[in-house]
Structures are given as structure tokens and as C-alpha cells.
Amino acid sequence: MSCRAALAAFCAGDGPTGWSALPVFAPGGAAEQACAAADAEREAGHVVAPAPERVFAALALTPLESVRAVILGQDPYPTPGHANGLAFSYAGPPPLPRSLVNIYRERQADLGLAPPPDGDLTPWARQGVLLLNTALTVREGASKAGSHLQLGWRAVTDSIIAAVSRERPAVVFILWGNPAQAKRALIDESRHRVIVSAHPSPLSASRGFFGSQPFSQANMWLEQNGQKALVW
């Protein structure tokens, strides 16, 4: 399957008021252009992650109408076999990606919860946590992080973030790392809560991610605004 075929399948099953109603998902729009660029990467011999059928997994699992929180990262894991379409999530065997290990470490310090046995964050997504990256694809391999940040995904994820800000009430936006924080201007902070910190990567977690308490802060905001706390 190509990324363009995966996009068509996603849009066909998304519903008339979902993500695919955004102009960027229209035929010939920004999403199709970004997918075409990702397909061109594959045709040129590069391995692109995640698999095409998982590129839009975050949007499929967390419809616009159910979003209560957004965790925004940079791009999918470039380590072969790690990316699955949900930012920071990992469904493979041990060891876990180091960024996810750090997320679980901060979760334990913040909420007192022991690390779960696996890295699958699907339960978060099903509660309304949109696990989004600023780019939806990446080249696999060492030193390939950020390789698709200029591939055309920016317009797509800008539109997604703006739609959440516009359409949803009292959302918590958790922005990890500089590419994520660059989206802050798209968020109406008079209506939503924004939590920013360094990225949980081992390269930056000690510079402000550890000790940031994003999970308790998110739940406090949700409860103050009449919503149930998330089960992190």
C-alpha cells in the first residue's frame, strides 16, 4: 500500500464531520502532496516509517469530536520497527524506545504509577488523547530524525492543531520539544491549557522534561473544566 492509498482509505472511513473534512485532506490538498512526497522517498529506495496503513492511525483512533488532550512530538521513531503512527507509542518487544522510557519515568514521578509492561499508548488515544507528531512520516535509520519535517506535513498538522483549538472545548495541549512548541501560536490559550517542556529524548529530557508534571497538570485542568481525568 502507498501513503496515497492509505490516505484515500482513511478519508473514506472518517465521516463527514471528522478530520477529513478539513481542506488539507481534500483531493490535491496538503495531505495528498505530503503522501506523494513520502511515496517518492520509498520509490527512491528509502525505508519510510510508519507503514503506510499506520500513517493516519492517530487520527483514526482519536476523532476530532473526542479530543480532550493533545500530546505533540516531533516525528515518528526512526529506529526500524518502532513507529506505529501514534506519537511516542511502541508496540514491539523490549527494550522500549528511550523517549518512552523517559515518559514513563516522568509519569511515575508525577503520578506515582509504576511503568506499564509495554509501550502501546492506544489506551490513551481511546480516551481522547491525540498522539500527534509534527510530521507523520520519517526515514528509518540512525540519524534520520527530522528527515521529513520539510516534506509537506507542516500544513497538515497545522490544520489539525488549529481545528482542535477552534472546535473543541478546554483541551490540554502538551508540546514536547521545539518543533511541537512552534505550533503554540495556533492554539487559543484563552480557551485551552498549553503545557510545554523539552522533548523526552535522552538528548534533552534532563533540560526541562523531567519534573514538568504534564500528567497531573493535564488532569487538573480537565477536572477544573468539568471533564473526567485521564487514566494515564
Image: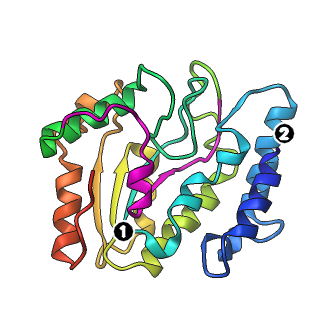
Determine the residue positioned at 46% across, 79% down: 166
- Residue 11 versus residue 144 in the image, above or below: below
Q: Where does label 2 land, which residue?
A: 40
Residue 138 in the image, given as x and y percentages of width and height: 64, 36
Secondary structure of the residue carrying tag 2 is: helix
Determine the residue positioned at 64% across, 38% down: 50
Q: Amino acid at mark 1?
A: Arg
Q: Quadrant of the N terminus?
A: top right
On screen, residue 87 versus residue 141, left or right, reads left
- Observer-nearest of 1 and 35: 1
**Res. 140 image quadrant:** top right
Q: Is residue 142 magenta?
A: no
Q: Where does label 1 land, which residue?
A: 68
- Residue 87 versus residue 207 in the image, above or below: below
Q: CA distance from mark 2 to mark 1?
A: 35 Å
Secondary structure of the residue carrying tag 1 is: loop
Q: Is residue 135 magenta?
A: yes
Q: Which residues are magenta?
A: 114-139
N-terminal label among 2 and 1: 2
On screen, residue 160 versus residue 164, left or right, reads right
